[in-house]
Amino acid sequence: MLEESVKNTIKKYNLIENGDRIVLGVSGGPDSISMLNILFKLSKEMNFEIFCAHVNHGLRENAKIDEEFVKNFCEAKNIDFHVLHADVSKLAQDSKRGLEETGRMVRYDFFDEVAKEVNANKIAIAHNKNDKAETIIMNMLRGAGMAGLIGIEPVNGKYIRPLIEAERSEIEKYCEEEKLNPRHDESNDDNKYTRNKVRNVVIPYVITNFNPNIIETISRLSEIAKDDLNYLDEITEKEYKELVIAEETVGNEKIIRLKLKNFNEKNKAIQKRVLLYAIKRIFGSTQGIEKIHVEDMIKLCNNNIGNKYLTPNKKTKIVIKNKQIILSGQI
């Protein structure tokens, strides 16, 4: 039973606690309407409050019908309903971004806005096990490292994913059993989008010709990668603490100094991870730093020539000076 499975996921990852106030992102499709229905039932049993947030992207003829469907569902169960009407097409054009990226940004910004408005401490997204497998495949196609094999995690800060261990087939069956009559987004059938092509073409082909349990197989791969990555993160933090000389903030610039000689004695895998760890300590993320940038930074360090510097991007600078690696960035 899907409800029991979701309850187990919530307990396993401690997704929901007593007194939580949770905004649910609900499109009206099978995943999100199932999540809304299940968390509505569990909210009384587990003592938490839910609020529904729906975005009308203004892209499809049936978008208004989807909106009314979610609104009526919420009204019938006395669930607080919030809606945003957005012209995603125009926003994408103005920002020179793709429709998918712009739509995602609009949704998450709105979920954050609603969370502040209702004083919610968590936001629930209806990603399922299939979504996770699709993400991992897409990451592999882009040449991602080990972190890319983890895919979508059950919890990421304030974002929780109660359906992440449920397969799409289980969710569709639940919708039939509960007579939820979810909406269908016809844009999900358009294979010009990479995710749709992976979902509608690649995975069915693998299921038919190679492995009928590919979703579960990829999920296991994700768990293995997660365990290994957690261990590597511990090692990286330990190595960083041995290498760091100082962390300084001068005005709006953060500076990290590392021991050059000791750094060059480390395994290349550790060197990469330490540099990325330092950059994350400066900026809070490693966004904009690619594999080639890390390789160039390591070459600079290994050359061991003083007063040399590199600027991997506009915000980041790495200098070799006084037997130190000096990383700095505007914050």
Image (cartoon, grey):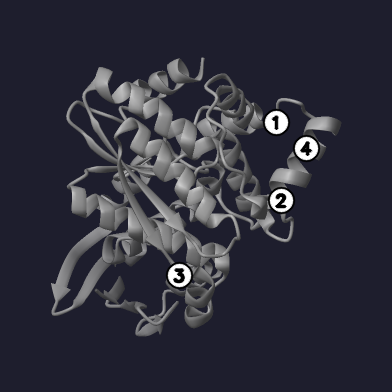
The image shows residue 95 at horizontal and vertical percentages of: 47, 79
- Residue type indicated by callout 1: Ile
- For label 4, the SS is helix
Quadrant in the picture for the C terminus: bottom left
Total tally of numbered discs in the picture:
4
The foreground one among 305 and 35 is 35
On screen, 145 above or below 131? Answer: below
**201 left or right of 1 in image:** right
- Residue type indicated by callout 4: Pro
Q: Which mark is residue 288?
A: 3
Spatial CA distance of label 3 from label 1 is 32 Å
Upstream in sequence: badge 3 or badge 1: 1
Upstream in sequence: badge 3 or badge 2: 2
Q: Is residue 262 visible?
A: no
Asked whether disc 3 touches disc 4, contact meaning CB atoms under 8 Å apart, the reply is no
Upstream in sequence: badge 3 or badge 4: 4
- For label 2, the SS is helix
Q: Which mark is residue 189?
A: 2
- Residue type indicated by callout 2: Asp
On screen, 286 above or below 145? Answer: below
- For label 1, the SS is helix
Instruction: Give the residue at the far right of this rendering.
Output: 209
Residue marked by disc 1:
214
Residue marked by disc 4:
204
In this rendering, which labeled residue sits more in front, label 1 or label 4?
A: 4
The foreground one among 113 and 238 is 113
Spatial CA distance of label 3 from label 2 is 32 Å
Asked whether disc 3 touches disc 1, contact meaning CB atoms under 8 Å apart, the reply is no
Spatial CA distance of label 3 from label 4 is 34 Å
